[in-house]
Image (cartoon, rainbow, N blue to C red):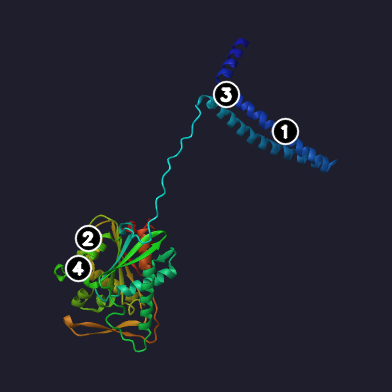
Amino acid sequence: MEIVLVIVAVVIVIVAWRTILTIAAGLIAGGAVGFAFSVLIIALSAGIFKNDKASMDVVAGISIFISIIIGSVVAFKVWKKVWEALEKPDKIQTEPESVPVPKPVTPPTPEPRKSDKQDKSDKTVIMLMGQEAVGKTTLLALMYKEFTRNSHFPFVASNDTGIDLEEAYQKLCTIIEQPNFTQPPRLLPGTASVREYNFNIENREFVVYDTAGGLIMTKESDGRANDLEDFRNAISKASVIINVIDGAAMLEGNDFLADRVNSPTRVRDLLMRYKGGDGRCLILFVITKCEAWIKTEAGIDKLRKAFEDRHKVVLNWVGENPNRAGIFVPVKTLGCVEFSFKEGDGEQEKLVFHKKTNLKFSQENVDKPMQYAVRFCMRRSILPIEKHFKFYGNSFMIQF
């Protein structure tokens, strides 16, 4: 029986010698460290408490407990190190000495000259679309001013863009503050064709195209081939299209006036032709000239119902593809100029606006279109949207 036990012990030692050795090394190291710590603490406490046996007993108990913890940690670390060393024996001797291979020297890429124009394909495109005199350029000037004030993004306009939009804003302020102001057909000069405004946001290049309203209804035979090509290219490249809509004409105008001023069917046709693929696209339906209704929830409800009725063809296009989304965004651009009444009938009908002397030049929500556009292009969630706005399409399009 004794011989059997000896044989079993020998077999265990042969088979599990690594385990036994590592455990032994860990226990020895841990025990030594724990014992040394305990002796040190007891020796120090003996000098402090001297003949106070009760205090000495408490210190001894605490030191032994702490010594066990420290010893266990040391034992585990020693066991792990010894085990790893035994798992890979003679690794240093058996592996050939590695000779460092020099990395190939890559010549530095020369920086482009400042005069070199950046390829527009590298830029993120946002486009303003709408008929003449709906307020696209006014919206852009105010949107730039408010977005610069309120944006959480590091937002920098190029030199010319910043100057042009600041001048437009100052001119708008001058016109609106005139004491005998009555609204002309346009507050700011309309864009002649397709105008480009450049911005840098978080080291990403953005280009905003402001387009002439007349291009929506321009024919091939009108002699504006270059302008039409630029207009169509802007639509096809745009990740976000801001469709600016005259809210007063939409709500108060007859069918002829509403269609002539906002042209929803023509907008749908252009989107179908040049944005008909499966690429991601956000359409922001920005309602301007709606100061008379945006003040109350009932007024906003009227605007929204009129929009959904008269722009149904565009909303149907948005809903046909899960990669499209739209947002109804009523904004206050002037604050002190409101719709007063209609005059004329049929094709001669027109709307009349007046300045309210008791109201100030002020804005509301004009920064939201740019906020939404930038967040969408940078794949940042834009949910939840503002209370009085409405979303159309696939909600997953605007949350990431």
Q: Hey, what amino acid is under mark 3?
A: Arg
Q: Hey, what amino acid is under mark 2?
A: Tyr
Q: Earlier in the sequence, mark 3 or mark 4?
A: 3
Residue 35: which numbered mark, if any?
A: 1
Q: Earlier in the sequence, mark 3 or mark 1?
A: 3
**Circle 1 or circle 2, nearest the eye:** 2
Residue 274: which numbered mark, if any?
A: 2
Q: Earlier in the sequence, mark 4 or mark 1?
A: 1
Q: Earlier in the sequence, mark 4 or mark 2?
A: 4
Q: Hey, what amino acid is under mark 1?
A: Phe
The alpha-carbon separation of the residues under discs 4 and 1 comes to 90 Å
Q: Secondary structure at mark 3?
A: helix
**Circles 3, 1 touching at the beta carbon (< 8 Å):** no
**Circles 1, 2 touching at the beta carbon (< 8 Å):** no
**Circle 4 or circle 1, nearest the eye:** 4
| Residue 212, percent from left and from top | 25, 71
Q: Can residue 384 be seen from the camera position used here?
A: no
**Circle 3 or circle 4, nearest the eye:** 4
Q: Earlier in the sequence, mark 1 or mark 2?
A: 1
| Residue 325, percent from left and from top | 30, 61
The alpha-carbon separation of the residues under discs 3 and 1 comes to 25 Å
Q: Residue at the spot x=22%, y=72% of the render?
A: 214
Q: Residues within 10 Å of mark 3 (few under 14, many from 20)?
A: some
Residue 18: which numbered mark, if any?
A: 3
